[in-house]
Each structure stands twice: as C-alpha cells, then as structure tokens.
DNA sequence: CGCTTGACACCGT
DNA sequence: AACGGTGCCAAGC
C-alpha cells in the first residue's frame, strides 16, 4: 500500500455530509506529512471513488481543488452535500475525525 | 543521491 | 485579523 493509497482509502471512509482536514488524515496515518497528503490528492485517479473535495484545511478554509488554489466548485459541492460554509470557512461542526 | 516543489500547518510580527 | 517566514513529508527531476 502506497502512501497515496492510504490517503485515498481514508477519504473514502469520510461519511457523506461531513468533511475532514489534511491534518486529521495525516494523524490517522500516524504521520506528519500534511503536505504529502495534499500532494497525494493533487492527482485524484479515482474521481468519484475518492471524494477529495471533502478534504479542507485545518483552519476550515477550502484550500485547493483540481490543482487550483481556489475553486468555487469545491465549496459549492460541499454546500450541495449539506455542509454549511461561512466566511469561506466550513462550519467546524461538520468536520469529521476518524475516531 | 540531492535539490525543488506542493490541494498544508504553525508561530511570530 | 492579515501576512510572511519556517517546518513538515513524500514525489519528481
């Protein structure tokens, strides 16, 4: 299992209507490679399989998507999933953590 | 084998 | 509160 595979695997485990952060993902992997996590999602080979748009920054900001630092699509998708976004930041109550 | 880059995080100013 | 510099880890060249 590659690092990227682990990352994608965790992404798949995120329930619908919830989001997670790069930090949480890295923590779940028992590593501090926050950036490597994002790097892994940069190329999302399994678009629908891995909902990478549910991964946001630890401070609640959307971060990037599809290789772009800012993609309104991402925030829009999240809102469509039922997640509330305020001030370009995801409401912390929607953040999901792996146990 | 070593340097640079990147969908980040943290701390100081 | 906003900006910038520094640290982190994995991949690519």
Image (cartoon, coloured by chain):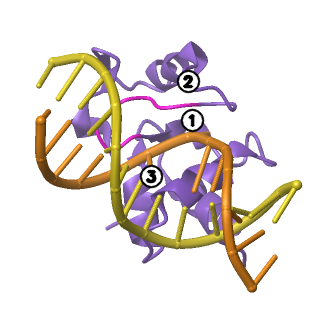
Chain colours: A purple, B orange, C yellow
Labels 1 and 3: the sequence-earlier one = 3
Please check whether the numbered discs 1 and 3 fall on a single chain.
yes
Q: What element does badge 3 sit on?
A: helix
Say above or below: B10 vs A94.
Answer: below
User: Is residue A96 something that shows in the picture?
Assistant: no
User: Is residue A7 something that shows in the picture?
Assistant: yes
Crowdedness near tag 2: few (<14), some (14–19) or many (≥20) residues, C-alpha within 10 Å: many
- The numbered mark 2 sits on a residue in which chain? A
Q: Which residues are magenta?
A: A57-64
Residue A22, labelled with which disc? 3
Labels 2 and 1: the sequence-earlier one = 1
Q: Is residue A84 magenta?
A: no
The residue positioned 72% from the left and 74% from the top of the image is A2
| Picture coordinates of residue A23, whole percent (x, y) | 38, 56
C5 or A52, nearer to the observer = C5
The residue positioned 61% from the left and 31% from the top of the image is A65
Q: What element does badge 1 sit on?
A: helix
Q: Is residue A61 magenta?
A: yes
Quarter of the rendering occupied by the C terminus of chain A = bottom left
- The numbered mark 1 sits on a residue in which chain? A
- Whether tag 2 and tag 1 are in contact, CB under 8 A, the answer is yes
| Picture coordinates of residue A85, whole percent (x, y) | 33, 19
Quarter of the rendering occupied by the N terminus of chain A = bottom right
């Amino acid at each position: 299992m590659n690092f990227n595979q682990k990352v994608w695997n965790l992404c798949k485990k995120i329930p619908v209507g919830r989001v997670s952060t790069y930090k949480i993902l890295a923590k779940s992997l028992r590593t501090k490679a926050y950036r490597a996590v994002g790097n892994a999602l940069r190329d999302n080979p399994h678009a629908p399989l891995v909902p990478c748009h549910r991964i946001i920054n630890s401070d609640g900001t959307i971060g990037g998507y599809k290789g772009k630092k800012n993609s309104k699509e991402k925030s829009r998708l999240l809102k469509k999933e039922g997640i509330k976004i305020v001030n370009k930041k995801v409401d912390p109550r929607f953040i999901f953590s792996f146990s």
